[in-house]
């Protein structure tokens, strides 16, 4: 167990180090001063308590939530690449309930908004889940396709049924105060969604390690056939449940973004969190606590990237390259570790 | 009405001096930032804004910075980061920034935010409205004058009021030349979908349109390509550019472009801000400040009849003097007919 933790931390440290090195080389190659850029990156992510709370942690919320969604699914052997679409489904459901229930008190409306987001995300995951279980269609393709449907459904909603009552711009009306998540730390932008993400991570950690369902989920993920034959586990049910819980958590990410930050639904709500989530999940070694750490790391990376643009004049495209290099580094290291372990036993 | 007129006179002087700069004596250390939600390498809307920022840097000796933002959450973050850093003036180049601008404006009363095409107004949140419809009206005149079939087409991206406004004006301009003209209109729902814009253009050409204008961003290549293919198939077909001077993009088919001179407008706004004349109400920049115009492609000037050119010039003068009022679709808070 201790060895495992050490290995995980090792992977993370090596990935961060390798990424920093690759990043510095890329910056130098692009004609930017890596030291100035690194300084901007640090100030923009950890420079002050307010920066850390208002930018890094705020950015980490959707990354942690979608990262949890992806890691849970992957643990069950469900290749849910559809967190992006599930996030949008959750956001649409959340804003719909938030606008419809505008007269309700916050104590009822906020939970209703989050519940709607969960159900929206789960409903979005239901389609590929049933297609896999009933028709045997691999979920990698179907979840990706459902992403596009989700993104375009959100676009349709803000141009059509959910467009602001002025009917001018492609966005919804703004949520009333009672539908908004409270601020967690006064005089920062950090909202309750962060606490929610931490609670969910802790809950999932317990679920995975201590509960029967967690055991079944891991067994199915390790080998569905063995789980069915030797463990008498009804694998179909486990797969369906993992899919729905994963989709529900990704849906919460969308709902939290709406009710915690933007207070309205817009096109382009997500810059691809559902995809970055895969990197977050892998960097976190598919472990809920690891995902929290990885989510904060990616949040800091993105926050720092913004500061790099502002202070060091580094173009936005660069951060895309850095993120891609992190994903590649992590994948390579995770693979190397797996191969090494198999060879050693 | 004092403010807009001061703004107009400043703007006129900027346009008159042009981009040469040099004799600027302003020593106030202005700090100006630009936010775009697309790359400034687009040779159009965002590139114009970036050129404007650079012009503010060279013309006013300002310290400038730019950030490309993707999501509404990032909009808030960028506003807060710039405002907390003491930036005086933030240009947010698109209506999508308006809600975040209002939120940031409340927190940082000493920072002024200019929202291009925005609809929401506060003491320090100011929409900058380009009256592109004034250029589009002149383009409509050119279209109707050039058309042999009596049918002209408009291919749009997303049907938001500013875009609809340019098309209403185009239609009005066309009718001023030919009251019987038929005007086709298609919105593809996407500013950058080249294939959809091309398809819509082909459909309009097949319905008889022989002059096509667009109001899309990167998708304009699809419009021009469809017109080129129609010409290759032996039909006389023309295209018109929009937003920036696109005459060079397809010099063989684009007769002229309705343009916005964003850089000059940005500098004028910065100057007016230094004079204390920016705040509390929208800034309108149109053809009487020469920010908006219709520019004939020199390579195709010979296909435009002389009397048509004269009528276009006359209308341009009348628009500038206020004698001719071009139809537009109002969308700024407080404007007539807008909540």
Image (cartoon, helix red, strand yellow):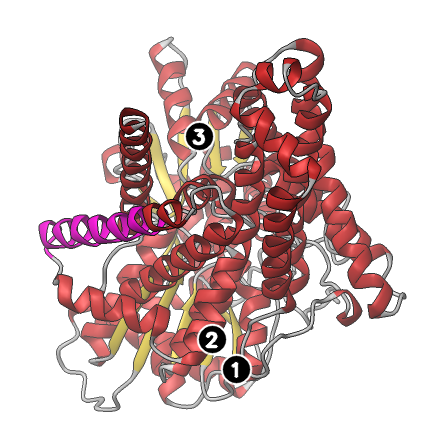
User: Residue at point 52% right, 75% down?
Assistant: B126
- For residue B124, the mark is 1
Q: Where is residue B301 in the image (x, y as percent from the top left)?
A: 28, 36
Q: Where is residue B122 in the image (x, y as percent from the top left)?
A: 60, 79
Q: Position of residue A263 (x, y in %)?
A: 67, 62
User: Residue at point 24% right, 40% down?
Assistant: B298
| B131 shown above or below B160 | below
Residue closest to the eye, B184 or B106: B106
> Which marked residue is nearer to the observer: mark 3 or mark 1?
1
Disc 1 on helix, strand or loop? loop
Badge 3 density bin: few <14, some 14–19, many ≥20, Cα 10 Å: many
| Residue interval drawn in magenta | A8-31
Residue at mark 3: B146
Residue closest to the eye, A235 or B134: A235
Distance from disc 3 to disc 1, alpha carbons, whole Å, reads: 45 Å
Q: Can residue B151 be seen in this view?
A: no
- For residue B113, the mark is 2
Q: First in sequence, mark 1 or 2: give its number.
A: 2
Callouts 1 and 2 in the same chain: yes
């Amino acid at each position: 167990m201790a060895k495992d933790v050490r290995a995980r931390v090792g992977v993370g440290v090596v990935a961060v180090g390798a990424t920093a090195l690759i990043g510095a080389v890329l910056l130098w190659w692009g004609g930017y001063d890596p030291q100035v850029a690194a300084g901007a990156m640090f100030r923009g992510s950890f420079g002050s308590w307010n920066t850390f709370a208002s930018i890094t942690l705020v950015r980490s919320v959707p990354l942690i939530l979608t990262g949890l969604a992806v890691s849970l699914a992957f643990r069950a052997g469900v290749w849910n690449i559809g967190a992006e679409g599930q996030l949008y489904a959750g956001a649409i459901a959340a804003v719909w309930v938030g606008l419809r229930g505008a007269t309700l008190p916050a104590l009822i409306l906020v939970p209703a908004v989050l519940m709607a987001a969960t159900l929206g995300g789960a409903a979005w995951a239901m389609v590929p889940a049933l297609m896999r279980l009933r028709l045997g269609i691999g979920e990698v393709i179907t979840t990706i396709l459902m992403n596009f449907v989700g993104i375009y459904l959100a676009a349709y909603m803000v141009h059509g049924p959910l467009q602001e009552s002025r009917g001018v711009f492609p966005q919804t009306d703004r949520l009333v105060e009672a539908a908004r998540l409270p601020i967690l730390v006064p005089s920062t932008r950090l909202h309750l969604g962060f606490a929610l993400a931490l609670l969910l991570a802790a809950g999932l950690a317990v679920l995975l390690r201590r509960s029967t369902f967690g055991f079944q989920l891991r067994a199915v993920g390790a080998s569905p056939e063995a789980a069915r034959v030797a463990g008498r586990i009804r694998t179909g049910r486990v797969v369906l449940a993992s899919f729905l819980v994963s989709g529900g958590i990704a849906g919460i990410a969308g709902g939290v973004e709406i009710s915690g930050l933007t207070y309205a639904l817009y096109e382009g709500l997500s810059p691809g969190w559902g995809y970055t989530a895969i990197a977050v999940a892998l960097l976190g070694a598919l472990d809920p606590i690891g995902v929290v750490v990885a989510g904060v790391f990616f949040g800091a990376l993105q926050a720092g990237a913004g500061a790099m643009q502002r202070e060091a004049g580094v173009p936005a495209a660069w951060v895309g390259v850095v993120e891609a290099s992190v994903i590649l580094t992590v994948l390579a290291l995770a693979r190397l570790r797996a191969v090494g372990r198999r060879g050693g036993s | 009405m004092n403010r807009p007129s001061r703004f107009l006179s400043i703007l006129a002087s900027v346009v008159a001096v042009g981009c040469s700069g040099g004799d600027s004596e302003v020593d106030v250390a202005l700090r100006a930032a630009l936010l775009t939600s697309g790359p400034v390498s687009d040779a159009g809307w965002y590139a114009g804004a970036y050129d404007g920022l650079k012009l503010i840097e060279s013309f006013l000796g300002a310290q400038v910075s730019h950030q490309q933002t993707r999501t509404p959450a990032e909009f808030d973050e960028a506003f807060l980061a710039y405002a907390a850093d003491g930036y005086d003036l933030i240009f947010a180049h698109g209506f999508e920034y308006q809600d975040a601008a209002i939120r940031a404006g409340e927190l940082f009363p000493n920072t002024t935010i200019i929202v291009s095409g925005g609809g929401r107004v506060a003491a320090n949140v100011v929409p900058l409205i380009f009256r592109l419809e004034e250029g589009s009206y002149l383009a409509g005149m050119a279209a109707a004058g050039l058309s042999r079939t009596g049918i002209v087409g408009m291919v749009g991206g997303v049907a938001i009021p500013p875009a609809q406004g340019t098309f209403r004006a185009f239609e009005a301009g066309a009718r001023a030349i030919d009251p019987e003209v038929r005007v086709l209109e298609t919105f593809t729902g996407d500013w950058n979908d080249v294939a959809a814009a091309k398809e819509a253009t082909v459909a309009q050409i097949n319905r008889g349109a022989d002059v096509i204008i667009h109001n899309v961003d990167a998708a304009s290549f699809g419009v021009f390509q469809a017109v080129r293919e129609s010409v290759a198939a032996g039909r006389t077909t023309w295209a018109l550019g929009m937003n920036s001077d696109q005459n060079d993009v397809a010099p063989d088919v684009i007769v002229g472009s309705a343009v916005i001179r964003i850089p000059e407008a940005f500098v004028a706004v910065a100057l007016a801000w230094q004079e204390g004349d920016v705040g509390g109400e929208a800034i309108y920049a149109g053809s009487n400040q020469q920010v908006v115009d219709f520019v004939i492609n020199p390579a195709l000037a010979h296909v435009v009849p002389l009397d048509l050119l004269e009528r276009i010039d006359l209308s341009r003068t009348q628009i500038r003097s206020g004698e001719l009022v071009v139809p537009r679709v109002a969308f700024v808070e407080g404007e007539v007919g807008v909540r």
